Amino acid sequence: MKESPVLPVHDSKTGATTLRTLDDLPGPRGIPILGNALEIKPKQLHRLVSGWAEQFGPLYVFRVATTRILTVADAETIQQLLRDRPDRFRRWRKIEEILVDIKADGLFSAEGEKWRRQRIFLMHALNARPLVTSTVSRIKSAWTLTA
């Protein structure tokens, strides 16, 4: 197996950051050769991963055959990863294939330039301030005209 990458892990309770490898992280045991592959059902993946997060904590590793998958269930860490993507971090290469199968592909499976374009669009779409501002302006104008 390849050497495990080193990850900075932030403890939100103590504020300390420590370096850990994938080998240091907890996770479901799995079986020889297949790892956790037999436990993974695409339509139930969100429940399985959520249950493992409750059991093993916000950072854990599971395995599908020889591929180890780092799972992050901590909002602060996820925000940092999203800021650093796609230059420093990449999703599991098979995730797009899985998400296409369950018809959930898009921003959450895109990489590289495709991800950058979609992220810019989504950030504008989710920014409610211009929408609220223009709506308030229209209502104010309507009130002024009727007064």
Image: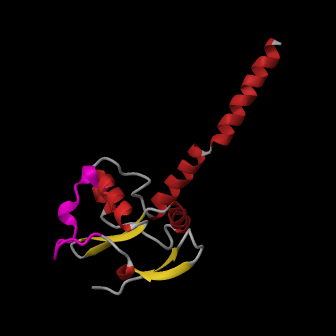
In the displayed structure, 31 sits above or below 21; it is above
Q: Is residue 84 left or right of residue 93?
A: right
Relative image position of residue 6 (x, y in whole percent) = 45, 83
For the C terminus, the image quarter is top right
In the displayed structure, 57 sits above or below 16; it is above
Image quarter of residue 54: bottom left
| Residue lying farthest to the top in this orientation | 146
Decide which of 31, 6 is in the foreground and name it.
31
Residue at 34% in and 71% down = 61
Image quarter of residue 111: bottom left
In the displayed structure, 52 sits above or below 135; it is below
In the displayed structure, 12 sits above or below 117; it is below
> Total number of numbered labels?
0
Residue at 63% in and 41% down = 128
Decide which of 3, 103 is in the foreground and name it.
3
Magenta segment includes 42: yes
Relative image position of residue 15 (x, y in whole percent) = 60, 73
Relative image position of residue 91 (x, y in whole percent) = 39, 66
Which stretch appears magenta?
28-45
Relative image position of residue 42 (x, y in whole percent) = 25, 53
Magenta segment includes 20: no
Q: Is residue 4 left or right of residue 141?
A: left
For the N terminus, the image quarter is bottom left
Q: Is residue 101 visible?
A: no
Residue at 33% in and 58% down = 51
